[in-house]
Amino acid sequence: MDPRACEIEGAHSHWRDPQAARRQTSLQIGCGIGGSSEIALQAIRPRELALGGKTQVWRGDEARITLAWSLAHRHVAAAWRRSGAGLMLVASAPLAGDWVVHANLGHQRDELLRRRSTIWALAAEHTGLGGGGRWQPMAEVFGDDRGRPWASAALRVGLWPDRLFVDASLARQLGGANSRLATAGFKLAF
């Protein structure tokens, strides 16, 4: 984001597998702070706060590499405890036509479970179909070194050009695990 440009994002997710189900709701505000960087604060229900940021470390004519980080704290037993930390490199480049490809590789630590994971993702998103490019389909394969990968399809719709978007996604864990994830969200840029 440009310096002093901000976004408010909200999301709701519903994850389920054969043994359990879990819901999560979050609200985030992020702003550009200059130096090709942005910072964001996210409230995650139930009882978690996350601070994150991104810095573009390289930009070519159309490709770029970004470093993203996050630190999270959760309210546990009447106290706030560090619950997680992550660091990720994101490479983005144009693909055929109006598609952009993103490749992510990173490390994540769950402090409460004392578990480390290598995380990865490969995604493609369309820059916009239809009048004004308001329909933006996406597809992603993602996972970590602890389980089977996931496949996801998503759609973002621009309701107010470059200002207000809504999105939804459906994901399924591959390999017969029968785990599913559904999300819905919005973004308001100002």
Image (spheres, rainbow, N blue to C red):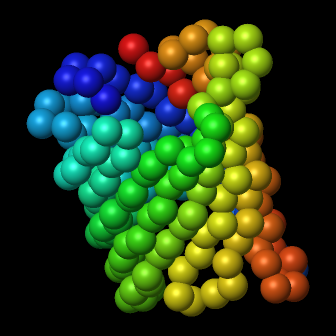
Residue 4 in which image quadrant: top left
Q: Examine the rendered structure and indicate whether residue 14 appears above or below residue 176.
A: above
Name the residue: 74% across, 66% down: 151
Any part of residue 150 in sight:
yes
Residue 113 in which image quadrant: bottom left
Horizontal and vertical percent for residue 15?
74, 63
Horizontal and vertical percent for residue 40?
32, 40
Horizontal and vertical percent for residue 90?
38, 58
Name the residue: 43% across, 37% down: 28
In-front residue for pair 177/57:
57
Name the residue: 68% across, 20% down: 134
68 relative to 99 in the view: left or right: left
Name the residue: 19% across, 37% down: 36
Total number of numbered discs in the rendering: 0
In-front residue for pair 169/49:
169
165 relative to 32 in the view: left or right: right
In-front residue for pair 183/114:
183
Horizontal and vertical percent for residue 133?
66, 19
Q: Examine the rendered structure and indicate whether residue 166 appears above or below residue 48.
A: above
Q: Examine the rendered structure and indicate whether residue 187 appears above or below residue 108.
A: above
In-front residue for pair 77/38:
38
Q: Examine the rendered structure and indicate whether residue 169 appears above or below residue 167.
A: below
Q: Locate the C terminus by quadrant.
A: top left
Q: Locate the N terminus by quadrant.
A: top left
Any part of residue 79 in sight:
no
Residue 176 in which image quadrant: bottom right
